[in-house]
Image (cartoon, rainbow, N blue to C red):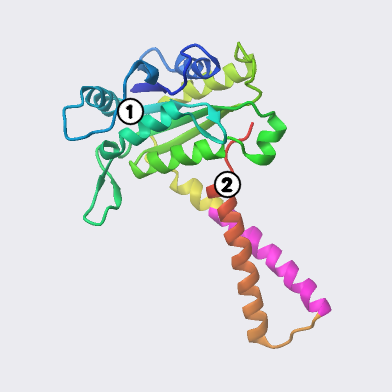
Amino acid sequence: MKVLGILGSHQRDGVNGQLLQAVLAGVGPEDDVSTIFLNDFQILPDTGQPNPVLDQLEQQLLAADVWVLVAPTYWGAMSGVMKNFLDCMRGRLVRFNHVGDALPDRFKGKSYVTISSCYASGLEEFVTGMTDGTFRTFDKVLSAAGLLKIREVVQTNSFGLKTLPMKKRTECQQIGASLHHKAKRTDDTVKRYGQLFGMVACATLITMLLQRLVNMVLPVTQFWANYVSFVLIFFILLASVLRFFTVVKHRRH
């Protein structure tokens, strides 16, 4: 298995670089590991002229089975270094149909891990999701390219931090050690069906409880009125839960 680390920060050996190195250190000795420090390259978009930098980066991406992408979060979004890389690679990561829809192409089936850091405290990150914008951008780009997500990692309290805490280093190394196994999975279909079942079951229970409370105040005996109120409450709850887990909630510690 080939694992490619992609570092999108201005410092090679800063906190973000240490996060990446910790993950790669956990990868088995039988696996091939390489790293791209994006700041080493002058990355420009394709303009119809030869672009040897993107050609080189594209070949490294194609050769790898797992990508580990690292970008610090600034102002609620990923670093410009990583964003510029993803923007300039746009026409190579996906193919476009006749109406401009992005479709998976040559990278389909590969796997990825995303990592970010922020100055926010652990509590602030958990409540506000400071790094959510970074992870949403990662997921939007990489899922469009057909990659399968393995894990997210967050390092909070990064202001003035020089050395990665041992607990976080160990977590990253464990993720690296698990890549060989997880990258072999084609998808998480069973897990997703289980999560969906749990969401539906919870939404149904809450709907029944709310409907009973409403009927205690405003008794409704007509079947269709009960049915309509149940459907409305149920789908509002289910839509809220689905949005939280698929759009808003990311790994926040």
SS type, badge 2: helix
In space, the residues marked 1 and 2 are separated at their CA atoms by 28 Å
What percent of the width, then of the height, locates residue 132?
56, 39
**Residue count near mark 2 (Cα–Cα under 10 Å), binned few <14, some 14–19, many ≥20:** some
What percent of the width, then of the height, locates residue 218?
80, 81
- Whether residue 225 is situated above or below residue 12 in the rendered picture: below
Identified at 63% across, 85% down, the residue is 224
Which residue carries the number 2 mark? 248
Identified at 32% across, 19% down, the residue is 41
Our reading of the magenta stretch's main secondary structure is helix
Which residue carries the number 1 mark? 65
**Residue type, label 2:** Val
What percent of the width, then of the height, locates residue 153?
55, 29
Q: Which residues are magenta?
A: 196-217
- Whether residue 78 is situated above or below residue 3 in the rendered picture: below
Identified at 29% across, 48% down, the residue is 103
Residue 96, visible in the rendered structure: yes
Quarter placement of the N terminus: top left
Q: Nearer the viewer, residue 73 or 33?
A: 73
Which callout, 1 or 2, points to the residue nearer the camera?
2
